[in-house]
Image: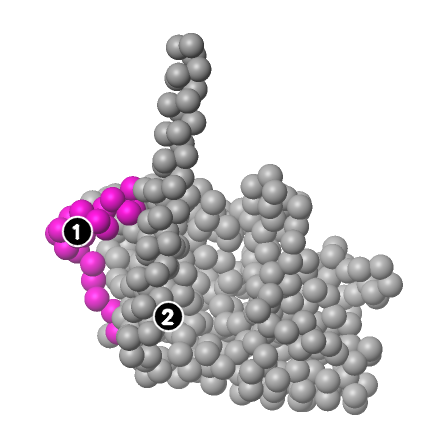
Amino acid sequence: MRRTSIRSVIKWGLVGVLATQVTVAATVMGVNHWRRKVRPKRTVFPHTAPEKFTVGDSESTIYTYGVDLYDDMLTEIRRARHRVLFESYIVKDDRVGREFKKALIDAAARGVEVYVTYDGFANLVVPRSFFDFPPEIHVLRYPAFRPGVLLLNIRKSGRDHRKILTVDGEVGFVGGYNVGLVYATEWRDTHMRIRGPAVRELENAFVDFWNMNRKYGQPELDMAGDRYWDPRFRVQRNVPEQVIYPIRAMFLEALDRATDRVLFTQAYFIPDRELQRALIEAASRGVDVNVLLPENSNHVLVDWLARGQYKVLLRGGVRLWLYQNAMVHAKTATVDGRWSTIGTANMDRLSLVGNYEINVEIFDEGVAKHMETVFENDLANARELTEQEWEGRSFAAKFSELVLAPWRPLL
């Protein structure tokens, strides 16, 4: 009888906790939905003009505004002579998405090999017919449902979160931008164009993913020409199916080496304990550690889960900057004016140990200086969150963070 009572108390206690979590989550989402309706949409925010840099034998251009990026991407697709490899997490069925689709179809019509990869889950709200291409275009839809999700196995349920475009093995693009009208003007993101032999790093990433996931009857891709490697320019790829996660190690190594300043921009910021510790240890050594993130992102529950770590980070000397009235979606970092990274990986569990991700790692002072300028310009549209302000938030906010905290390992 006693054991039955204990079990009953535990069972109903767990039911109560889950019900409270669901109620808090629903409330948070409801309030956020209402605020979006009444909050004015901002389409003007600071962004830095595209700028070119020479890194080794290659040229790189950094973009912080979608209109500039899409114009150049489309120009390169329209110039293609041999092969286009296009991979995107999201492609919207809107004016921008249709413009990309037409450019790819036109390229194939003039004899260019065209390969397209997109994530099925991320595009569930996009009509499936939008991804119907002529038969000469090879299309890989990364499955929307993966069985690992039933076992909460993040390695077996992660997404293809990468954004890659390469043209003729001569020019390539990589970064945080998905394809769509909202990203063109309303989101602050960062992308990079590479021209020269280092493009082969991006092309190789696409080829490996395609060959690993292609369906029966789809052609196997090969790499044309000689392999190229430049230690100043590296491409780091997370491959969860092979338990390969270099991007997390890259972040940890950069923080461990920092001696002066660290500038991170992150769309979704939920660092694990080791990354949290690395940020705080850098600050304790006197390094000026700064993290820029959206005050209100497009995923409100992620925001609330991230806020549960603000207290320990602020107490540890990490400076948090909240981007105002627009979504900052960039995934970048620069350290000590020497090292930088631009890519697709957020600093959260889903990106670092679950999704297919790709980040470019650049060892170049010119690029690093420009990334610092970009960060400084972004701060013109941000406010610093102080420890005093955070301690003074409402009881309801503190309670909601506490209730939702157990969900943090899922993201």
Q: Furthest-top residue in view? A: 1
Q: Which residue is mark 2?
A: 327
Disc 2 is placed on an element classified as strand
Tell me the residue at 79%/89% (across/down): 110
- 10 Å crowding of disc 1: few (<14), some (14-19), many (20+): few
**14 on left or right of 137:** left
Tell me the residue at 79%/88% (across/down): 109
Earlier-in-chain disc, 2 versus 1? 2
Report the span colored magenta.
381-402
Q: Can you tell which of label 2 and label 1 is closer to the viewer? A: 1
Work out which quarter of the rendered image holds the N terminus and state it: top left
Disc 1 is placed on an element classified as loop
Q: Amino acid at mark 1?
A: Ser
How far from the left and from the top, in percent, is residue 346?
Answer: 45, 57
Tell me the residue at 84%/66% (across/down): 219
Q: Nearer the viewer, residue 297 or 192?
A: 297
**Residue contact at pointers 2 and 1, CB within 8 angstroms:** no
Q: Which residue is mark 1?
A: 394
The stretch drawn in magenta includes residue 393: yes
Q: Quadrant of residue 335?
A: bottom left
295 versus 288 height, above or below = below
Q: What is the CA distance from the residue labelled 2 to the residue labelled 1?
A: 24 Å
How far from the left and from the top, in percent, is residue 50?
Answer: 44, 82
Q: Nearer the viewer, residue 369 or 206?
A: 206
